[in-house]
Image (tube, coloured by chain):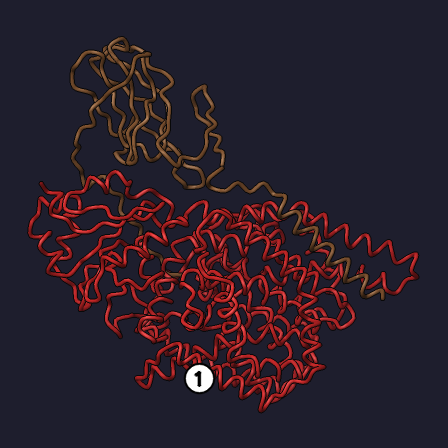
Chain colours: A brown, B red
């Protein structure tokens, strides 16, 4: 009888453990909230990047150009600065291009987002109509001067050097 | 997971029981140690499948794996019913041992299911890419020989594999996958989890039974505790080794056989031990080396009389292993020191806190709770006091010596580092192997409380019983969350496939005819179409359908960014019958390789399918216009 009580106690501990497992707040990839900490003043809290996302939080005149500061999801590979007057758009490639003004943020070696700190020469904030973040499944308007944003995606070239080499598969 | 419950059951039944069950029952019957049945049956089954398949392969026979499994099953059942004839009483005893491991197994099952919630059920790291490729290769070639299965590309010819690799677990998973029709990456991860969640607790129960027949609950408690160590299940699944998990899970049952051999001697146990250590060697070499170290440690403890029989056994074991080892590793052993060092698998660690790290089982992972560490140390001291039990302490301390040598940055220990070559001189590996025994030793003080409660009157028995339960609850409260997060960190960090990708790969088969192949890359998710659906792909190698190096495929790889700009390369796609090119967004190390938009902009290729991480393209000249 006492042996049975002891076994039941172990069993109860196991059940307690199972409840502990269930109670751990495991957020699935679909609902995970990522707290993004940046060296800048703002702390971003966003859902995981399952689609194009990002924000341009600051667009200021600086010297002979404008200074854009914000963040973009890993999917975003272009930032298009659309001017008010009908002149060619300024397209900036981000992500794999390893630009010095684009910082990729990793958490546990997982690519989370890119911080952008871009300088667009020969331009002023007053001449910018909107800023568009472009990715494979669509685009997102990240900043506007208040008017509707229209732009024309440009066909871009491709540079093999953009591709990172796959690491050698280690044998263990 | 894409397999249905029937497929999962069929896989587990074959993987666990066929053909090892009869021998496992005979072994358990000799000692009335019934947990040994389900602890040893998977070990013998892995060995039985591997040895039989390899022998057939050596004679040039490459059997259909389902047919092979059918014949092995019939022979196994004939042996069980005709020769072993288990009784109802024995069956009841086996069921009783199932009840004892139930708390630990249930907890472990919940932990793993919760950990993989929302992710593809596929082991996620660079190690899993290789293992799944080799298992799928066994499935395709029907050969378990390293020269056929241990390859870089599925397009390599038979006999093209080089070097030695232990393929026992791989071949057993391949046969089980063939029987159940379970997809290879799912079968491989399922087998690893099942070994950890079911077979490891049975091994601990059997070992606890040998350690002390009085402390009856030590095995059940150890089975519960072992699920809560973040070290072994977490780390190998995130960046380490699948075969390490398999080997470690089989280590307690192997040690049980070793200790019974030392204890009883005789032809049966000696042969069984040689068979056991041979299987472990071909599952994962570091655990076989650990077994030898622990047996030597156990013998030195003085718990067992060492007579002529044991010395004879040692001589036989040395001959049985020394000669094959010299043959298999002849190039390494006689090839100079640099060959040894090339096997070293870990950088020099920070050695300042070596002892603390050992007792906390803390290498590159969340620190195990202090309660668990305190239980481990207290359990070691308590167990050391008993002459009959101190062999396990001695065995664990022998692994401590190996651990210290494996990572020593300087001094005399560093000079001895070559001794830890079987563990790749890796301080992680020499610590992973301690986990089951740390769980067992940590369980001893709690089990002692349970035992004391049975000796006291009903009113007084409540106190030690409550204390034992409270300790268990304390450990769970502090340890379950970090363990769960650690296991979960594997797919979180480096998942190369999302749940939708399996369907994308399945659908991509419609673009590939029987005589066509696919182009893919090395060390990323694009290797998985072969593992999942046995689609023949280049896997980063410049081989064509015949298995020869083909300069045209070199040209295709180098022009992939713009095949329209190199019409010769585009033509070569057709002439080499490359029907599909797979791209992956995530490398084996978690880094970003391709973005979908980049692939969509490639000229000469058209995207026909895109999942979460896999992008399927076909050659298309219309994109050049």
Report the residue at 38% width, 18% height from top: A57
| Left or right: B23 as drawn, with respect to B449 | left
Q: Is residue B344 above or below residue B146?
A: above
Which chain is disc 1 placed on? B
Between A78 and B418, the one nearer to me in the picture: A78
Q: Provide residue B114's location: percent of width, then percent of height.
A: 55, 50
| Left or right: B151 as drawn, with respect to B248 | left
Q: Provide residue B239's location: percent of width, then percent of height.
A: 44, 52
Badge 1: few (under 14), some or many (20 or more) residues near its Cα, within 10 Å?
A: few
Residue at the far top in the pictured view: A126
Between B496 and B309, the one nearer to me in the picture: B496
Q: Provide residue B530's location: percent of width, then percent of height.
A: 31, 61
Residue at the far left in the pictured view: B568
| Left or right: B368 as drawn, with respect to B149 | right
Residue B382, quarter of picture: bottom right
Residue B296 seen in the figure: no
Q: Quadrant of the C terminus of chain B?
A: top left
Question: What residue is disc 1 on?
Answer: B71
Q: Which element type, helix, strand or loop, lies under badge 1?
A: helix
Q: Is residue B484 above or below residue B164?
A: above
Residue B82 seen in the figure: yes
Report the residue at 46% width, 41% height from top: A29
Report the label total. Answer: 1
Q: Provide residue B398's location: percent of width, then percent of height.
A: 59, 65
Report the residue at 32% width, 80% height from top: B62
| Left or right: A152 as drawn, with respect to B265 | left
């Amino acid at each position: 009888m006492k042996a049975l009580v002891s076994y039941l106690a172990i069993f109860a501990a196991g059940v307690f453990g199972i409840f502990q497992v269930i109670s751990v707040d495991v957020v699935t990839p679909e609902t995970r909230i990522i707290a993004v900490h940046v060296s800048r003043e703002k702390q971003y809290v966003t859902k995981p990047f399952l689609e194009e996302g990002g924000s341009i939080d600051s667009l200021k005149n600086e010297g002979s150009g404008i200074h854009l500061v914000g963040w973009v999801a890993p999917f975003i590979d272009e930032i298009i600065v659309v001017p008010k007057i009908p002149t060619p758009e300024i397209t900036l490639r981000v992500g794999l291009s390893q630009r010095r003004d684009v910082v990729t943020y990793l958490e546990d070696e997982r690519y989370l987002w890119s911080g952008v700190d871009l300088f667009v020469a020969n331009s002023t904030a007053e001449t910018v109509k909107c800023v568009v973040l472009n990715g494979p499944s669509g685009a997102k308007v990240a900043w506007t001067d208040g008017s509707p944003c229209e732009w024309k995606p440009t066909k871009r070239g491709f540079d093999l050097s953009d591709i990172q080499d796959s690491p050698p598969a280690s044998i263990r | 997971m894409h397999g249905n419950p029937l497929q999962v059951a069929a896989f587990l039944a074959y993987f666990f029981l066929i053909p090892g069950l009869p021998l496992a029952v005979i072994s358990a019957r000799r000692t009335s140690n019934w947990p040994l049945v389900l602890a040893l049956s998977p070990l013998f089954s892995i060995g039985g499948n591997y040895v039989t398949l390899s022998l057939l392969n050596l004679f040039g026979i490459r059997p259909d794996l389902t047919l092979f499994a059918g014949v092995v099953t019939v022979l196994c059942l004939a042996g069980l019913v005709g020769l072993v004839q288990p009784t109802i009483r024995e069956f009841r005893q086996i069921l009783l041992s199932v009840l004892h491991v139930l708390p630990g197994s249930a907890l472990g099952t919940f932990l793993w299911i919760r950990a993989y919630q929302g992710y593809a059920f596929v082991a996620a790291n660079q190690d899993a890419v290789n293992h799944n490729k080799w298992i799928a290769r066994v499935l395709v070639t029907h050969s378990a020989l390293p020269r056929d299965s241990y390859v870089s590309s599925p397009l390599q010819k038979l006999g093209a594999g080089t070097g030695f690799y232990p393929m026992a677990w791989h071949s057993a998973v391949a046969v089980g996958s063939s029987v159940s029709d379970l997809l290879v990456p799912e079968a491989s991860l399922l087998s690893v989890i099942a070994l950890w969640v079911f077979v490891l607790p049975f091994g601990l129960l059997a070992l606890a039974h040998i350690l002390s027949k009085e402390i009856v609950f030590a095995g059940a408690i150890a089975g519960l505790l072992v699920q809560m160590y973040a070290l072994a299940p977490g780390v190998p699944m995130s960046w380490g080794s699948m075969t390490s998990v398999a080997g470690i899970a089989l280590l307690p049952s192997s040690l049980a056989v070793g200790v019974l051999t030392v204890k009883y001697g005789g032809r049966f146990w000696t042969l069984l031990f040689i068979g056991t250590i041979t299987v472990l060697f071909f599952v994962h070499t570091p655990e076989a080396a650990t077994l030898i170290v622990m047996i030597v440690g156990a013998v030195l403890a003085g718990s067992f009389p060492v007579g002529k029989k044991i010395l004879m056994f040692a001589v036989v074991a040395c001959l049985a292993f020394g000669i094959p080892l010299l043959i298999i590793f002849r190039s390494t052993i006689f090839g100079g020191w640099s060959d040894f060092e090339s096997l070293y698998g870990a950088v020099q660690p920070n050695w300042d806190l070596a002892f603390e790290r050992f007792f906390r089982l803390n290498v590159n992972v969340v620190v195990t709770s202090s309660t668990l560490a305190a239980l481990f140390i207290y359990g070691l001291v308590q167990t050391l006091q008993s002459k009959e039990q101190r062999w396990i302490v001695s065995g664990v301390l022998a692994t401590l010596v190996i651990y210290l040598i494996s990572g020593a940055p300087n001094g005399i220990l560093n000079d001895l580092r070559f001794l830890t070559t079987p563990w790749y001189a890796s301080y992680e590996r020499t610590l992973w192997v301690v986990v089951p025994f740390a769980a067992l030793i940590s369980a001893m003080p709690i089990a002692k409380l349970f035992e004391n409660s049975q000796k006291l009157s009903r009113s007084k028995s409540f106190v030690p019983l409550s204390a034992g339960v409270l300790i268990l609850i304390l450990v769970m409260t502090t340890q379950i969350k970090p363990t769960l997060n650690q296991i979960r960190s594997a797919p979180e960090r480096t998942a190369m496939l999302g749940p939708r990708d399996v369907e994308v790969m399945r659908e991509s088969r419609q673009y590939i005819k029987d005589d066509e192949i696919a182009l893919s890359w090395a060390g990323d998710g694009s290797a998985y179409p072969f593992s999942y659906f046995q689609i023949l792909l280049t896997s980063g190698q410049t081989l064509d359908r015949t298995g020869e190096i083909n300069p045209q495929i070199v040209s295709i790889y180098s022009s992939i960014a713009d095949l329209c700009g190199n019409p010769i390369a585009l033509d070569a796609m057709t002439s080499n019958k490359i029907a599909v090119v797979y791209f992956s967004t995530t490398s084996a190390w978690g880094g970003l390789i391709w973005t979908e938009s980049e692939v969509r902009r490639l000229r000469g290729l058209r995207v026909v399918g895109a999942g979460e991480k896999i992008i399927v393209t076909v050659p298309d000249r219309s994109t050049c216009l």
